[in-house]
Image (cartoon, rainbow, N blue to C red):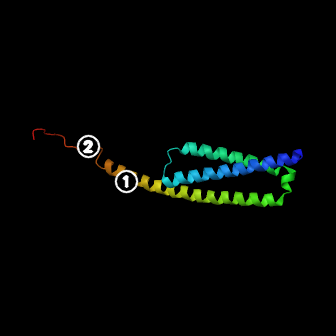
Amino acid sequence: MDNEMLQGTQLILAVETAVHDFAVMQEKHGAFMVAGDLDDLPLLCDQRARAFDRLQQSLTDVWQNEMVQQDMLLGAELQKKIGRILAQEKKLAALAADRRQEVRGQLAQLRTGKKAIAGYGGRSLMPKYFSSSL
């Protein structure tokens, strides 16, 4: 096996690993969104950014390799895998939009409650005098 072929094989393996890692990250994020467990949102965003960067870099490396560019079967296979990733991204975006809408509704309810409390002039609802002689 010559050096260029070995390099091409390594690049293909790197892309397949990056695609797999990105898909696993998508599943994990989807599960968190469905569960409504977004306490670790900054960590999830960081994972997403790193997985995307690895995927982007590995794809760039593959398409810069002449041997890989000429492999039409590989190109079709990568296109299918990237298509699945994009379809999953659309599902995740829909989940995020649903969650955002849910949060907006909750915020509207909180604002209504805040206005109702402000209508009392900020005064306490407790009686001024309390008798403990009962």
How many tags in the picture? 2
Q: Is residue 113 left or right of residue 47?
A: left
* Residue furthest right in the image: 2
* Residue furthest front in the image: 1
Q: Which residue is mark 2?
A: 124
Relative vertical location of residue 89 with respect to residue 14 in this rendering, above or below: below
Residue 66 location (% of width, % of height): 87, 51
Q: Residue at x 66, y 57 (%)?
A: 85
Q: Tag 1: residue type?
A: Thr
Residue situated in front as seen by the camera: 131 or 119: 131
Residue situated in front as seen by the camera: 74 or 33: 74
Q: Which residue is mark 1?
A: 112
Residue 89 location (% of width, % of height): 62, 56
CA gap between label 1 and label 2 equals 18 Å
Q: Residue at x 67, y 51 (%)?
A: 20
Residue 8 location (% of width, % of height): 83, 49
Question: Which mark is on residue 38?
Answer: none
Badge 1 element: helix
